[in-house]
Image (cartoon, rainbow, N blue to C red):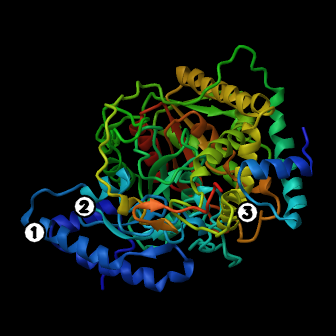
Amino acid sequence: MTDFSTIDITEAKKLLSQKKITATELTEFFIKQIEEKKGLNCFITKTFDIALKMAKESDEKIQKGSNLGILEGIPIGMKDLFCTDGVKTTAGSKMLENFVPFYESTVSQNLWKNGAIMLGKTNMDEFAMGSANTTSFFGNVLNPIRSDNQKDLVPGGSSGGSAAAVASGQCFAATGSDTGGSIRQPASFCGLVGLKPTYGRCSRFGMVAFASSLDQAGPITKTVSDSALMLQSMCSYDDKDSTSSKKLIPNFSDYKKFDLKGKKIGLPNEYIIEGLNEEIKKKFDQCINIFKDYGAELIDITLPHTNYALPTYYIIAPAEASANLARYDGVRYGLRENSENLDDLYQTTRASGFGDEVKRRLIIGTYVLSAGYYDAYYLKALKVRQLISNDFKNAFKKCDLILTPTTPNVAFPIGEKQNDPLEMYLNDVLTVPASLAGLPAISVSAGNNNTNLPIGMQIIGRPFEEISVLAAGSVIELSKV
Amino acid sequence: MSIDNSIVRKVGKLAKIKIKESEENKLLDELNNILGWVDELKKVDTEGVEPMLSVFNESMNMREDKSDSKFSNNLITKNSPEKKAGFFVVPKVVE
């Protein structure tokens, strides 16, 4: 059997159209990979029968050569928070262990319409709350990349199963969702490309909600070119999502024609934080030079409220979560712990169905919204969010793109940062600000550190300017050192 | 602002999450840590700043106020732990 794990979607599309391979062959290859690599725990639910059926349909379409989708015949992984009609959707939680939706999320629907093939539902932090994929009810995901000291590393989170599956060649690409860094951080830890589009680009309909003003779907891929293809297939205006954007959807692959020459790239000094890993800093400096070589102009900018982004996020996201996750009441769907008393039924169901991190955030969220504390915490955080957003608006008057490292550190061993929640939260310190401002941001691997662990660089762009973000990302990709 | 056990119990009730006595102190410490950290925000001058509820600034679509559900009661109650004749079943709440 040919090894398809070394090629990307862009190449596979070529081979499919030349009829050198079939979608069924591709699907059978990845099914075998998933079986062989099940020790990494990337998938919660495998959907091989569905995959083979979809592959057959794609092959028939390719034979006829008509109505071909952008991803016709391309097998992918679907993060287990996108509702899939008739296929279990757990969001990594015991609460939804047996939940089978009877409708399809818009993002997954768009992907199937575009010919993508579903291999299975990927593992994730419970309700997308985590940065290491260690909060999943279905167990840790292992990073397929090992450092020279051979310890098992986290893949990052919350889209950890998606990232580990792509990095280990179990699928061409996978969907992710990003609330504070859940696409970019795992992409960075696994040496991949992770794109969080502008808030509103992808519909949130059918995506299990965490924090609705922040949640945004996006792709995790091996290459920037694949990222553009995946995003193209995922986004659409959707009247089932009240914050779905009606802005024109461009051809994202046009990033290849985007010239960075003369473009201004901002370097925010606030992102060179205390505790930023030395090798990451070094790689960041190398990237600055790469952009200079491309004829871009590098300028210093300031985003003065950056330090406050993480605490702001840890008020707003839990507050929204506490409202969104109120739906898990043991009555309409999900787990139920029976009781004679309705209130007791709610309380014991939620105590038993949610894991520790989710409970912690729901309690924090409930507290900051409760009478007497609302103004001091929640309202204050909303105001600081405005200041953070203004920082970006001001910066983008002076520059076209912003370059930063994606994470303060590389992937860490499983079991680390488990005792203090705050230590885990710090993983997202460089990704959260763009989330709060709803901006498009990509993480692209810029090469490895001296123990062979990948380092990701982040490019942040103006709203709806994914093309320039992809273009800058491809520069990093091409010059990977 | 630091909180005590009674607030943890009260918020647990509001969040409808039963907190075991054995978990209470650990949770209290974690919450105080997190709240102590988010207290950083008090340092920010937000005088005259409008709260930002959403980054979305396009007008939202209004739809006609009419039912368009294509889902049957049976489908909607399909995932319910307890159902009867197309209804969700809960413990008796009135005497």
Query: Percent from the top left, x then y, of residue A341?
Result: 69, 62
Is label 1 in a helix, a strand or a loop?
helix
Indicate the amino acid at tag 2: Gly
What residue is pinned by disc 2? A115
Q: Residue at x 51, y 55 (%)?
A: A480
Q: CA distance from mark 3 to mark 1?
A: 51 Å
Quarter of the image for residue A46 reads: bottom left
- Marks 3 and 1 close (CB-CB < 8 Å): no
Left or right position of A247 against A279:
left
| Mark 3 or mark 1, whichever is nearer to me | 3
Going by the numbered disc 3, the residue's amino acid type is Asp
> Percent position (x, y) of residue A240?
36, 42
Q: Is residue A477 above or below residue A162?
A: above
Q: Is the residue at mark 2 from the same chain as the one at mark 1?
A: yes
Left/right placement of residue B2 relative to residue A458 reads right
- Position of B75 with respect to A314 (left or right) is left
Depth-wise, is mark 2 or mark 1 nearer the camera?
2
Q: Is residue A350 above or below residue B39?
A: below
Circle nearer the N terminus (3, 1)? 1
Residue A253, position in %: x, y?
31, 45
- Mark 3 or mark 2, which is nearer the start of the sequence? 2
Residue appearing at x 44%, y 84% in the figure: A35
Look at label 1 and name its amino acid: Gln
Indicate the chain on which mark 3 is placed.
A
Front residue of this view, candidates A48 and A459:
A48
Q: Which residue is mark 1?
A: A63
